[in-house]
Amino acid sequence: MNRKNALAAAVAAALALGSVTVVATQSTAATQSTAATQSTAATGTSAARPGAGFKAMTAEARGEAIRTADRNAAATARELGLGSAERLAAKDVLVDADGTRHVRYDRTYSGLSVIGGDLVVHLARDGKITGSDLAHQGAIRVAGISPKLTAAAASSAAVRHAKHVKNPKAGSKDSTLVVYAVGKVPVLAYRSTVTGEGETGPASREAVIVDATSGAPLDQYELHQSVTGTGNGITVGQVSIETTQSGSGYTLTDAAHGGTIVYDSYNSPQSAPKQNARTFSKTTNSWGNGTTSSRESAAADASYGLAKTWDYYKDSFNRSGIRNDGRGAPAYVHVDTSLLNAFYDDDCFCMFFGDGSSQNGNTPVTAIDVAGHEMSHGVTAATAGLNYSGESGGLNEATSDIFGTMVEFHADNAGDPGDYLIGEKLNMPGGYMRRMDNPAADGNSLSCWTSGAGSVDVHYSSGIGNHFFYLAAEGTGAKTIGGRAHNGTTCNNDTFAGIGKDKAAAVWYRALSAYMTSTTSYAGARTATLQAAADLYGTNSQERYLVSKAWAAVGVGTALPDPGTGIPAPSPSTSTPPTPSPSTTPPSGNALTNGGFEQGTSGWTQSDNIITNSALQTARGGSSYAWMMGYGTAAIESLSQSDIAVPSTGTPKLTFWLKVSTQESGSIAYDTLKVKVNGTTLAAYSNAHASSGYVQRTVDLSAYKGQTVQLQFAGTEDAYLATIFLIDDIAIG
């Protein structure tokens, strides 16, 4: 779906909670108990209900489905037109009630991992491929797999280009050769891990991707990203947790939830958080005293939150744990000293929780929504694998906020009722860390999509996804939720009802699981959720229509026609569109809407995520432009705008700026870009028009004087070698 941003990584977020006391009761439901081990539990869960339209599968059935997908991987690669050096490895399989399958694959090239190479293949019941969503379109082609840079040189380059940690360090063993296929033209690269002083402490880690030929930076992102806060935690009251009895003692091993174990890190340094780790064990089955004077209190919080997160995914979507394989991820509390963070690490499949700092009264960072947020990072890593940078990074964080919030609702804990405020129990200035009904109210987060969203810290760009979800779930207007005031504001002054939080979550989960890939952008997320809503509720359903309304309300796309009337939703009369910067303001009298793309996709219809602000190419002015073609394989794309009123006087003309770069040679037109008006080709450009910079092009529109027309840019690329067409500053006057 999307092809812009960079690689996914282990992710994290910090919130906080006070204390918990536990009353344990006997349970025989633990699936991993033995004759010598008996699960001691508190609360049972309701019968699992498949959600998001997917069929329930046993672990054995899922394993066999993945093995079948692996056996078919070579044939699938050939049918998708992938190259002979490429291999697919099945990562997950989801099956709809009608037998339709959604197979998620990772891709390698000559044995190298491909960053941005993941894809989802959709198959009918009879096994025929009906569609696919690829993070990188088409086959991977690179000049060779022998790098000019050594691993040591790549590590040195990574240190120079690190921007999230201070005093960075990296060794040659920390650099791995990969293929970087996030942009349209794949390149050989190194992925390096750099350590240094950062947001999560002195052992913060950052991934830096550098070109294996030049050492130029391609992407950077934190590996242990986290949110931080100040304030005191709370208690959730007396709760029940699952423990395990062994002989005359008990441990914090939750056999009813995949064998999840909570360990005491015993203040091991963040750089080695398991160094001093030990199990929690005792002869009685009551844990903690509701205060930080007992090390068990934070452990009870974590155990409770992780179990409630597991229950939410199982009850709502029939998902058994992070990777849907029935295994629980271990958790470590009391990590380091004065660590006001929590994080999930996919490399070790585990979670870590700090004790807080003087900023929040040294309250352990172990709230219910912390657990929901962190485990959901794991679910994202196991499904779409959303990159942790650019717009996909914002979607990654939004996903964790969305499901962390849903876990809070599902837990139904009287001490922490569900609401749409993130970190509301941290006693932060303003009363919360982030809020989903009006993200921009914190002074940093984005409530509305802008062309610069991909350059904003992912914790702030997540506001776009959070805002969408709130509006889709609750609609607009003021209401009280969980005892707290909420107000569904919009970016276009529209008003509408929501579809309810459970339906909105089902749409998001299906989109995440079946359609999103590592490079999905906000425009791609809109496409994915509209497809998910169609799958679940019907193409002409009110739910799908309201999902489109919610996206339009945060500045992503336009609302679909109302299925009740068939009439396109009117644009609110009081809406004020963003003002283009002076450098990209089109000429006076421009009949086009948003000719410089600084308002994103507004006014345009695109076949793919063509309109972008990716740093891999440059705009002529401002930050956004249209990037067409560049796959290096057979492909077509289109970008169009309708209902354009061509001036009725003078000599009307179309002007635009075009930059062409190509791997082709010679004057033969292998890859083309055609300019069409009402379907008639008026001009054509090709790889033979390659230029070092933007060149202004002019097309006479005298034949269309006084008419209302459609303008289309149509790109076609052949099966070998890439040509990129960049378009900016389009005007008709």
Image (cartoon, rainbow, N blue to C red):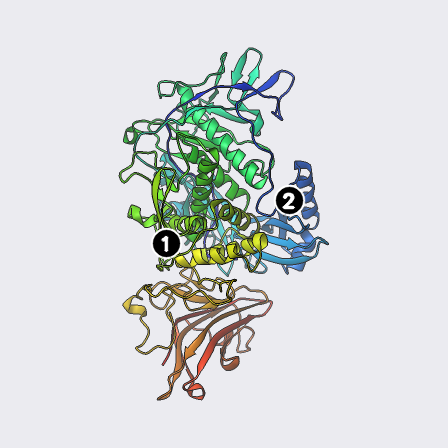
Secondary structure under tag 1 reads helix
Residue located beneath label 1 in the image = 455
Closer to the camera in the image, 10 or 53: 53
Relative to 621, say whether 422 is above or below: above
x 55%, y 45%: residue:
383
Closer to the camera in the image, 210 or 243: 243
In space, the residues marked 2 and 1 are separated at their CA atoms by 38 Å
State the image coordinates of residue 493 (x, y, percent, origin top left).
35, 59
Q: Nearer the viewer, mark 2 or mark 1?
A: 2
Determine whether, in the image, residue 273 is placed left or right of residue 635: left
Q: Is residue 145 visible?
A: no
Secondary structure under tag 2 reads loop
x 51%, y 62%: residue:
564
Marked residue nearer the N-terminal end (2 or 1): 2
State the image coordinates of residue 151 (x, y, percent, origin top left).
47, 45
Q: What's the residue type where badge 2 is placed?
A: Lys
Assign the C terminus to one quadrant of the image.
bottom left
State the image coordinates of residue 117 (x, y, percent, origin top left).
55, 53
Q: Is residue 485 visible?
A: yes
Q: Which mark is residue 356?
A: none
Closer to the camera in the image, 460 or 74: 460
Residue located beneath label 2 in the image = 55
State the image coordinates of residue 183 (x, y, percent, origin top left).
48, 58
Other residues around mark 1 within 10 Å, as few (<14) / some (14–19) / many (≥20): some
Other residues around mark 2 within 10 Å, as few (<14) / some (14–19) / many (≥20): some
Q: What's the residue type where badge 1 is placed?
A: Ser
> Does the CB distance between marks 2 and 1 fall below 8 Å?
no
